[in-house]
Image: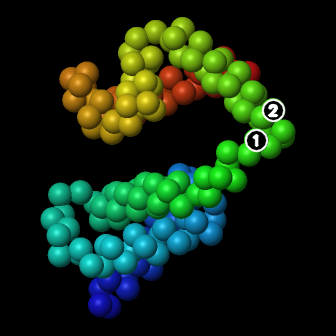
Amino acid sequence: MEEFEKIYSEYYDSVYRYLLALCRDEAWAEEITQEAFFKALKNIGSFRGECKLSVWLCQIAKNCFYTAGRRRNRQADAPLEMIPDPGDMEQKLLDRETAMELHRLLHQLDEPYKEVFWMRTFGELSFAEIGRFWGKSDSWARVTYHRAKLKIREGMQ
């Protein structure tokens, strides 16, 4: 147990910051971080050491985040969501225009940027999976995705 307390104190900030980047909500990130460490404690025996401990913890945290997100969506009060809010309608229109602009910029990208961005964003594939698909490394996929994002961001400005 003392060993896990050491792991908790050493990796808490990293996992929390990772989740905060995913959900952009401090309270929710803290809640999911606690859940992730609880699951890690329960399953510490299954850690095989094939990757860094921080990677393993972040993978658990990511899975907790997606599970919590699905749970939140199911628990949402559907009847209230069906009542349109006029301000919300304006935001949806702006979001739709932004989405159309993003798709236009995406289709103007050269290969492999377009395909890698598409696979990561819409296909939700890992960098390792994308790298294997292209016969390259996961670092190549990560860099290509980052460059595609930069090109789209430049086009939006």
In the displayed structure image, the side of residue 155 where residue 39 appears, left or right: left
Q: Give the x, y percent position of residue 153.
A: 64, 25
Position of residue 150 relative to residue 63, above or below, is above
Q: Taking the image as drawn, is residue 60 in sight?
A: yes
Q: Residue 104 sits in which quadrant?
A: top right
Residue at the outermost right position: 86
Q: Specify few, some or many for label 1: CA neighbours under 10 Å numbering under 14, 14-19, or 20 or more.
A: few
For badge 2, the amino acid type reads: Glu
Residue behind mark 1 = 84
Residue at the location (34% across, 36% down)? 125
| SS at mark 2 in the image | helix
Q: How many marks?
A: 2
Position of residue 104 relative to residue 19, above or below, is above
Instruction: Say whether marks 2 and 1 touch (CB < 8 Å).
Output: no
Position of residue 136 relative to residue 50, above or below, is above
Residue at the location (48% across, 68% down)? 32
Q: Taking the image as drawn, is residue 137 in sight?
A: no
For badge 1, the amino acid type reads: Pro
Residue at the location (32% across, 91% down)? 2
Q: Nearer the viewer, mark 2 or mark 1?
A: 1
Q: Give the x, y percent position of residue 14.
A: 48, 64
Residue at the outermost front position: 79
In the displayed structure image, the side of residue 56 where residue 142 appears, left or right: right
Q: Give the x, y percent position of residue 115.
A: 39, 18
Q: Nearer the viewer, residue 100 or 113?
A: 100
Q: Nearer the viewer, residue 42 or 50?
A: 42
Residue behind mark 2 = 90
Residue at the location (67% across, 45% down)? 82
